[in-house]
Amino acid sequence: MKFMLTFTWAPDARVRAEAIERFQKTGGLPPEGVTLLGRWTRVDLSGGFDLLETNDPKKLTQFAYMWSDLMALQITPVLEDQHLSEVFQSAPKQ
């Protein structure tokens, strides 16, 4: 299943520096069992988005734990349009 992780942080120079250092050390990669499909950072550096894929939500929690001391995180399950269309096709008509 695919998940959109949204991250944000306040404009705090110390926190930002620590986040950058951690990212440079780890590459910001998720743990084994989670595939990073894409990452986008807002141009104002206030946060961004990761598209992740996994069948193990515990691994998502592990990834969130790695970063939650530095930034606010939200993780939302998402569907691609093809799968959404399949849902609409099979849904009862009202």
Image (cartoon, rainbow, N blue to C red):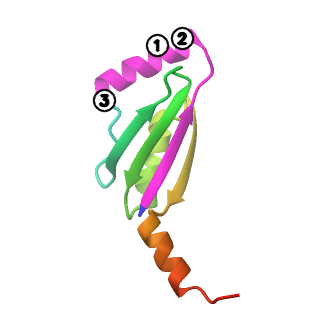
> Callout 3: few (<14), some (14-19), or many (20+) C-alpha neighbours within 10 Å?
few
Q: Earlier in the sequence, mark 3 or mark 2?
A: 2
24, above or below 27, in the image:
above
| Quadrant placement of the C terminus | bottom right
- State the separation of the CA atoms marked 3 and 1: 14 Å
Q: For the residue carrying disc 2, how many other residues have a C-alpha within 10 Å: few (<14), some (14-19), or many (20+)?
A: few
Dot label at residue 14: 2
Can residue 72 be seen here? The reply is yes
SS at circle 2 = helix
- Percent of width and height locating residue 49: 48, 39
Q: Are marks 3 and 1 in contact (CB under 8 Å)?
A: no
Would you say residue 70 is visible in this rendering? no
Tell me whether the residue at label 2 lies in contact with that at label 1, contact meaning CB atoms closer than 8 angstroms: yes
Could you say which quadrant of the image residue 93 lies in? bottom right
| Residue 90, image x, y percentages | 52, 86
Label 1 is placed on what type of residue? Ala
Check the image and report above or below for 71 versus 17. Answer: below
Dot 3 or dot 1, earlier in sequence: 1
Residue extent of the magenta highlight:
2-26
Q: What label does residue 17 carry, if any? A: 1
Q: Residue, x 39% and y 51% (percent of image)?
A: 52
User: Residue shown at 52%/59% (left/top)?
Assistant: 77
Q: Which mark is residue 66?
A: none
Tags 3 and 2 touching, CB below 8 Å = no
Mark 3 lies on a secondary structure that is helix
11 inside magenta stretch: yes
Residue sitting at x 52%, y 78%: 87
Foreground: 31 or 44?
44
Which residue carries the number 3 mark?
26
